Image: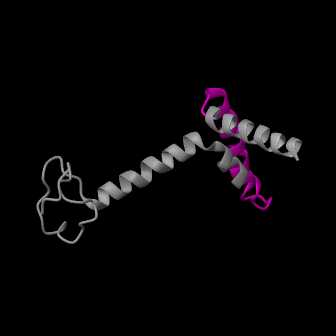
């Protein structure tokens, strides 16, 4: 099947994977999907510590969630020191100023 894809078959063609021999340099659909899931999860943990900290702060307070909240808040603080929160902080400031401008014009 030649659909003009640069890597060969589509990553969703999973039916023939088990019977076909592995070719060097060709990723299977499952490996491709896990790679996308893993890399996107890593990007979210690194660059979206705001959401992680907000989620943890909304957990019910108890002995099981306390370490999660502490770790999420510590990571958010560390990500800020490393400059990983710069984009989200900039967008947050921009949206707050835009809302303030809208209220001022009413």
Residue furthest out toward the front:
105
Query: Where does the image place residue 21, in percent across and percent down from the top left?
Result: 11, 60
Q: Quadrant of residue 97?
A: top right
Tell me what residue is drawn at x 66 percent, y 27 percent: 81
25 vs 90, nearest the viewer? 90
Q: Which residues are magenta?
A: 56-84
Q: Is residue 45 left or right of residue 105?
A: left
Query: Where does the image place residue 87, in percent across and percent down from the top left?
Result: 62, 35
82 up-or-down from 76: above or below? above
Chosen colour scheme:
one colour
Total number of numbered labels? 0
75 vs 3, nearest the viewer? 3
Mostly what secondary structure, the magenta segment?
helix
Tell me what residue is drawn at x 30 percent, y 56 percent: 31
Please say whether residue 80 is one of the residues in the magenta stretch: yes
79 up-or-down from 102: above or below? above
Residue furthest out toward the bottom:
15
Query: Where does the image place residue 94, in percent across and percent down from the top left?
Result: 72, 37
Q: Is residue 66 left or right of residue 9?
A: right
Q: Quadrant of the N terminus?
A: bottom left
Tell me what residue is drawn at x 37 percent, y 56 percent: 34
Q: Is residue 30 left or right of residue 81?
A: left
32 up-or-down from 13: above or below? above
Tell me what residue is drawn at x 86 percent, y 43 percent: 105
Please say whether residue 1 is one of the residues in the magenta stretch: no
């Amino acid at each position: 099947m030649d659909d003009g894809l640069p890597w060969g078959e589509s990553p969703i063609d999973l039916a023939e994977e088990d019977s076909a021999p592995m070719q060097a340099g060709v990723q299977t659909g499952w490996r491709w999907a896990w790679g996308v899931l893993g890399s996107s999860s890593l990007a979210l943990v690194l660059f979206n510590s705001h959401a992680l900290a907000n989620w943890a702060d909304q957990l019910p307070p108890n002995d099981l969630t306390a370490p999660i909240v502490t770790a999420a808040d510590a990571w958010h603080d560390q990500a800020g020191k490393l400059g990983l929160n710069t984009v989200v902080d900039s967008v947050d400031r921009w949206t707050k100023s835009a809302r303030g401008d809208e209220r001022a014009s009413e």
